[in-house]
Image: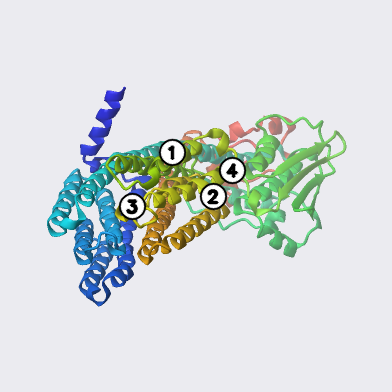
Amino acid sequence: MVVRALRSVIGDLLADHRVLTRGDGWAMTSVLRSIRRVALLVAAGWQFVMLPVSFATLGSAAWPLVTAQLALAATALLALRRWIPDFVIPLGMMAVGLWSYLASGDIDSALVFAACWEIDFASCLMGLLVLHRVSIALVVLPAAVTAVTVLLALPGWGAQLPTAIIVTQSSIILAIRAGLPWLLRLAADTDAVTARAESASLRTETIRRTSARLAEESRTLHDTAINTLGAVANGGAGVADPARVRAQCARDIELLRAMRGERAPSAPVRLRSLFDHLALPVRREGLDDRALDRIEERLGSERVRAVVSCVREAATNAAKHSGADRIEIVLAEDSELLRVVVRDAGRGFDGTIPEGRGIASSILARADAAGFSASVDSRPGAGTAVELRVPLDSAAEGREPTGGAPSWHGNDIEASVSALHGRAGDLWALGVTAISVVLTVGGGTNRHLALVPMLGVMLLAWAMSRSASLRRAPALLSGILIACTCAVFVLSAAATDFGSAGAVNWQALAPTGAFVLLLSLGSGRAARILGAAAWILTACGVAVLAGRASPTAAQITVIAALVGLGFVVVWETFRARVERLAERAGRARRSMLEAELRAELDAAAQADHRRWTDAGIETSVELLRAIAEGSATLRTPNSASPARRRSATCGSSCSSAPSWCT
């Protein structure tokens, strides 16, 4: 097991990490772009930290060095546009750091301390920007050159700093090379899981919408050809007016043509049209047209269409079966509901609703699909009442049968970004602890043995962040991590006598381990502000204490605090950048999936068209057209014998002209 893990680590160190970035998913794209942008901004930003430190240490002699720092900052900003190769920036930072060593000449100066971090950041950026294994050489060789130059040009500094330079830079690049593949693999895995979830969602959404459309097409067929031809066959009040029947046939033809895709759908249905083209005269009560227009704005077009279709089906059923000569439609607005009641005073029935028939399919199922409720109340001899209860709140817009944006399950970008951020926080906390161990063992300044408890606190913070019980108490865990951050800062300062001895070995990034864990665990805004304030106050207190020894020690303390706090700002910038890019990529991906969904639905619609054609709908359309155009003469209800009226069915209408048309 240990051998296998060691081989895996060595493989990551020597591998070409570009292989891991070949995917084009949102997670990988967002992570890589964010790393590059933030790294180059750090390179530019650190030069503006170096400027005042250079002037404070060198005075007017700092101008050549300051000019180089400004040029390097400008170069880093130009690299954002890919006008300059990325590897040039870290190499430039290493050169500026070496120049600062030579210009200062004082190992205990604030400029040398800042230059140490210039070189440290350069090694970090090289590992992040250059994914090829050549990055190891691009760090170790310049570090060796810097160490040799310091030994030769500044012999009074001794061998400790040159040795620390080589050890530190080698540790940094190896840690980056070992840790970055974990983050890249997590991004690749996230993209793979997202792709599978999106594929499954696409299939599910296609099936859902196709099923909904088939159900609606079946209802449309029932409400048009079947109802109209059935009414003609049965006779009664529904066909007492031949002109109305012919007009209804013409409208049915238009609806069926739209259903088969032969022409674009008609304009959106209005609530006012509740009273149009009904099979029986209507007595209206309740809301007027102005109220209906106001209510219509709060309903989706599909829901309005469903309400109107339900009302028309109720009216058609009344004309076909009730024996009544008119219907009553009552409209009311009641506690964020639109109530529509269609009532007749006909013969009624026992209230049993057969499955798959007109009421069940064209009223109850249609209402449920559109997100509102429908009920039918009837008793023999007491007429029938159909009541629709339609929510007016836009949040309950309903399950639109064929429209609306799909919900892509499994594509929760916020959760995925949070997982990436949490994993990265774990990796950083472990990585910075490992580097601190290496630096301590390698002979870093360790006055009062302060680095020993510092390492203990760093490991404690990581262990606490993994505790399931503490994660269920976020306030307590946040307090522990804030306390660990401040304790690590104080102990790292104490190890250098608060900047007075061996300050170049101050492990200023050590406190970021606990604080990054605080950020990656999704702590609230208040906890983050409190943590940053506690860190700043601790740094101010240490700076005041160090200032009693020397102003330089106070300057070094301030720089050490800026290093840690600046890294935290960079971390948050990286997280926010990943979230923004992920959201943008997610929107683009959803647009593409919706286009794929439309293509799938178009293909399904073509298959449906062939199915309807095979089922004989063309014959029904031709019969409706013959009635609408008058080429088929309608017999009056009394002219058809009862036997013929009973024998006329939808099946006969689909195969040949029945006896009630001549």
Which mark sits nearer the N-terminus, 4 or 3? 3
Is residue 320 visible in the rendered structure shown here? yes
**Mark number, residue 35:** 3
Is residue 522 visible in the rendered structure shown here? no
Which mark sits nearer the N-terminus, 2 or 3? 3
Label 4: few (<14), some or many (≥20) within 10 Å?
few
Q: Assess whether mark 1 and mark 4 are in contact (beta carbons under 8 angstroms).
A: no
Which mark sits nearer the N-terminus, 2 or 4? 2
Amino acid identity at mark 1: Gly
Q: Residue 237, position in %: x, y?
A: 76, 45
Q: Which numbered disc, 2 or 1, marks the residue closer to the eye?
A: 1
Helix, strand, or loop for circle 4?
helix
State the residue in front, 71 or 485. Answer: 485
User: According to the image, label 1 marks what residue?
Assistant: 456
| Tally of marks | 4
State the residue in front, 119 or 77. Answer: 119
User: According to the image, label 4 marks what residue?
Assistant: 476
Quarter containing the C terminus: top right
Helix, strand, or loop for circle 2?
loop
Which mark sits nearer the N-terminus, 3 or 1? 3
User: According to the image, label 2 marks what residue?
Assistant: 404
